[in-house]
Image: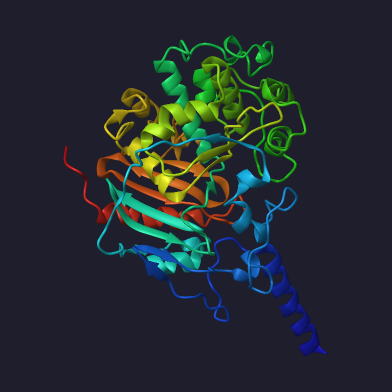
Amino acid sequence: MRWTIALKSCLAVFATSVLLGLAGCGTSPEQKTSAWQVEQGIGKRADGPNMSLYGGLTGSGFTRGTRDNWRQAHATVDSFSRLDEIFKANVSATALPVQPWQRSTSELTLNYQGAAVLGSGTQTINDYFERNPATALLIAQGDTLLLERYQYARQPEQRFTSFSMAKTVIAMLVGVALQEGHIRSLDDLAQDYAPGLQGTEYGKTPLRHLLTMSSGVQFREEYDGQDDSARLSRATFGRQSEGGASVAKLFNRRIAAPGQRWYYASAETFVLSVVLRQAIGQDVATYFSEKIWKPLGAEQEATWLVDASGQEVGYMGLNATLRDYGRLAMMMARSGVAQGKQLVPAAWVQEMTQAHFLPSRTGRWFGYGYQTWIFPDLDGTYAFLGVRGQAIYVDPSRQLVLVHPAVRASARDQGSADTTALWRALKQRIAVVKP
C-alpha cells in the first residue's frame, strides 16, 4: 500500500513537471540530445533540452503554432520563429548590397560560471545549450561571427520574434525622426502628434517620459494572463479593437506626474509607435526599412505585427533572422554606423543607452535608458530584452554583441541569469578594441 502511494506520488510529480516544463531546465539522464553538426561554421541540431515539453510528449516533431496556442510552451519552437505568419504583419524590405559577415576560422570555445538557479559550476557553451532552451545563439565581434548555432531544428532563414526587444528599435526610430525634424522636441506631448490621443492621460504625457517608462499612467504588466499587458495584446495584434490611438483609452488613469516614477509598461511603447507613425506620415515598417534596414545591409526582410488599423504595435512583434539581429546590434555597438553610414545619430545612441533610471529606481537588476536596459556596471554595456528569453547584449568598447532567441516556458523564468553569466565570461575573454 505504501509502495503504491509512493509510486502514485512520483508519477504525479513527473506529470506536473512535464506539463509545467520548468523553463531552462537541463536534460535529464533519460533524455539524450543529439550531437551538434557543423557545416560552413554553423552549428545545428534537430533537438534540444526538455524535448518532452518543446517537442511534444513523444519527442518527435514540433507542435504547429496557431492563434490559440502560440504562447503555450509546447508550440513556441514553431510559433516564435514564424509569428508573422500567425498574425498580420507589415514588411520592412531590404536592398543590396548585403553587409557581409566574416567567420572565425574556428568556433568560439568558452567556459563560464553557471548561474546558481540552473546549477553553479564551470560550464561550456555546449553545457549552456543543455541547460537553456535557446533556439539559436550568435556571438560576433566587429565584422566577424565567432559563433552561430541553431537548435530545435531552427534554420538561418527563419525570423525569430523579438517580444520587447522591439521597444529598443522604436526608440532608435524616434531618434531618427527627431533628427529629421518630424518630431520637434522630446518635451512635446504625445497628443501634439497623434490627435487620436487628445485628452487621454497618455496623450498628455511628454515623449521623454514615454521613452523612459515614466509616464505615471497606471499599467500592470505581470504576465498572468489577466493583466493590462494581456489586455493590450488582445486589443492590438489580437485585433479585438479598432486599434491605433483608441487603445490608449483602455489605460487612462494617472497615478503619478510624468517623470516621477518608473514602471515597466508596454503601452508606453505602443503610444510611441502611434506618435511615430503620425509624425513621419508613413507606416513604421517602411520608415524602418528606408532609414535602417536597407542601408544596414540586412539579408532578409523584417516584419512588424500590426493591429486592426494597420498600426505597428511596436512594444513587441519585430521579426528578423539571427544574423540580421546581429547586424542591427553591431550598428548600435558602432554608435549608429553601418556600411560607412550614420543610420542612427551617435548622440542619440549615447542618450538611449545611458541610465536615466538606475537599478535602485527600477527595482530591477538593470537600469533603464530610452527603451533600453542598462547593465548595472554602468560600463557602457546595454541590452534589448524580451520575455521568454529573447536578448541582445551589446558592448561598444569591444564591438561585441550576443543575440539570443529562446523559448523559455515562463515570462518570469530566472534562467536568463545563465545568459548573463555567459555574457560576463565572454567580456572577460574578448579584449577592448583600441580607438
Residue 386 falls left or right of residue 247: left
Closer to the camera, 281 or 30? 281
Closer to the camera, 303 or 354? 303
Residue 331 location, x and y as percent? 34, 37
> What quarter of the picture does the C terminus occupy?
top left
Closer to the camera, 202 or 154? 154
User: In the current view of this chain or complex, which residue is farthest to the left?
Assistant: 434
Residue 109 location, x and y as percent? 31, 65
User: In the current view of this chain or complex, which residue is farthest to the right?
Assistant: 1
Residue 59 location, x and y as percent? 63, 73
Residue 309 appears in the picture as rendered: yes
Is 109 above or below relative to 374?
below
Residue 378 falls left or right of residue 115: left
- Figure quadrant of residue 125: bottom left
Residue 84 location, x and y as percent? 61, 44
Is 429 above or below relative to 143?
below
Residue in the image at 66% along x and 28% along y? 310
